[in-house]
Amino acid sequence: MPSTTHSVDTKSAPKRSLQFASLDEVSADLDGLEAAMHAGGLEHTGNWTPGQIFDHLARFFIGALDGFDRSAPAPVRFIARMLLKDRATASDEPFPAGFKLPKSASALFPQPGISDADGLEKLRLQIARVEGGERMEHPSPLIGKLEHEEWLIMQLKHCALHLGFVRPAAHHDSAANDDLATEPQAGA
């Protein structure tokens, strides 16, 4: 398992190749990861621990549900909306790995030292909010206004990107690790 004291190039780090069509599919993947966590542990191939990955994903849901504390400057949002919105919300193209959040997006940084179990619980709570009918309607800090359905597509892609860096520990279930792809993808 990579140490969090050195940086991993997540563009080339091995990862599971995931694609989710619904929050039910995300929850099913989380169920498998939770079972592995209780049976022998989880490994990560990126820069964040599994708990930090779960926490980061939860924070993205929280921002979409409750609002983000900051936005990119208006000219950046305009350009990002023109260049990224369709790719992020309308295409089947996965999110690319290796994106570094700017310091101004610190609300999305994972909590240092959060346990895998606490991060997972936090993520499940946010997914439950959406499944319970709460709508993601706050503007994206980078793209601006999004409809709930557009947010959902982005959340599914974001989960696929980051959860790809988490897998059952090698000593737990080697078969579950067989679907790891070494193609570039996420910045977890």
Image (cartoon, rainbow, N blue to C red):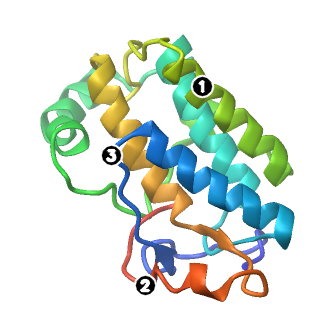
Q: Position of residue 31 (x, y in %)?
A: 65, 52
- Location of mark 2 (residue): 182
- Location of mark 3 (residue): 21
- Location of mark 1 (residue): 128
Which tag is nearer the camera, tag 1 or tag 2? 1
Point 62% across, 35% down: residue: 58
**From the viewer's perspective, is residue 36 above or below residue 183?**
above
**From the viewer's perspective, is residue 15 above or below residue 121?**
below
The image quadrant that residue 7 belongs to is bottom right
- Pick the residue in front: 57 or 21: 21
Left or right, 76 with respect to 184, comes to left
Which amino acid type is shown beneath numbered disc 3? Ala
**From the viewer's perspective, is residue 103 above or below residue 67?**
below
Point 60% across, 75% down: residue: 8
Decide if residue 67 is in sight here. no
Point 47% across, 21% down: residue: 64
Q: Position of residue 131 (x, y in %)?
A: 50, 23
Question: Which disc is residue 175 wearing?
Answer: none
Which amino acid type is shown beneath numbered disc 2? Thr
Q: Position of residue 109 (x, y in %)?
A: 65, 42
